[in-house]
Image (cartoon, rainbow, N blue to C red):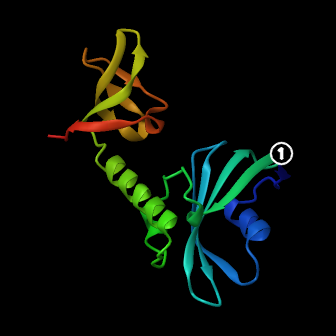
Amino acid sequence: MDHRAAGESHASFFTRELLGEKQTMLASAHIGGIGGTFYAAVRQLDSGKVWAMVVLTTGCPGARFGWKAMEEQMGPCECDCPACILDLLTPTDDRYAMEWRQRCRNRAALFGAVVPGAKLEFSVDFLTPDGPHRAFEVVNPSKSLFRSPSGVAYRLTNWRTQTFAIVEGAS
């Protein structure tokens, strides 16, 4: 736990707390709100090598702020790193880093196919007023709106954290 000043960005905070004078942050993104994950492409100034930093976060600016930092070579479970950050990373022969990068790219491709009209099948039931359902049609993924088989639209707030398959693409 640490205290982070109100208004201070994740990038500024983690640059100060985690990176030395021989490293610089090229790009970063924070996915999720409180309890989210911070991703960054970090360049080693002496070698030019660019690696991924992954930081789990909890809390909010101006209050208690918890974080746990990892490197891609640790094979983190979190794999929502945006492609714009992955594209900056230099090649590596580290098996854990390569597997993590591939999981991130696979997840980005899967979420890229979640467009209005696509039909998804989840591995768990979502309980709705008209019964439990696993299959939904995408209405608006950015607003988490999905249509059940009965034709009613619902907001599935935690759909991104669930395992799913695209059973039919958008027509």
- The residue at the far bottom in this view is 46
Looking at the figure, which quarter contains the C terminus? top left
Q: How many marks?
A: 1
- The residue at the far top in this view is 130
For disc 1, the neighbor class at 10 Å (few under 14, some 14 to 19, many from 20) is: few
Q: Is residue 63 left or right of residue 167?
A: right
- The residue at the far front in this view is 95
Q: Is residue 143 left or right of residue 139?
A: right
User: Residue 127 sits in which quadrant?
Assistant: top left
Comparing 163 with 21, the one in front is 163
Which residue is located at x 57 percent, y 87 percent?
48
Which residue is located at x 50 percent, y 71 percent?
94
Comparing 56 with 14, the one in front is 56
Q: Is residue 139 left or right of residue 102?
A: left
Query: Residue 132 at what x, y percent from top left?
Result: 37, 14
Which residue is located at x 40 percent, y 14 percent?
128
Q: Is residue 49 above or below residue 169?
A: below
- Residue for badge 1: 64
Q: Secondary structure at mark 1?
A: strand
Query: Residue 108 at what x, y percent from top left?
Result: 38, 54
Q: Is residue 101 above or below residue 26?
A: above
Which residue is located at x 57 percent, y 66 percent?
73
Query: Residue 76 at what x, y percent from top left?
Result: 56, 55
Q: Is residue 73 above or below residue 154?
A: below
Query: Residue 81 at what x, y percent from top left?
Result: 49, 58
Q: Is residue 71 left or right of residue 168?
A: right
User: Residue 24 sits in which quadrant?
Assistant: bottom right
**Type of amino acid under label 1:** Arg
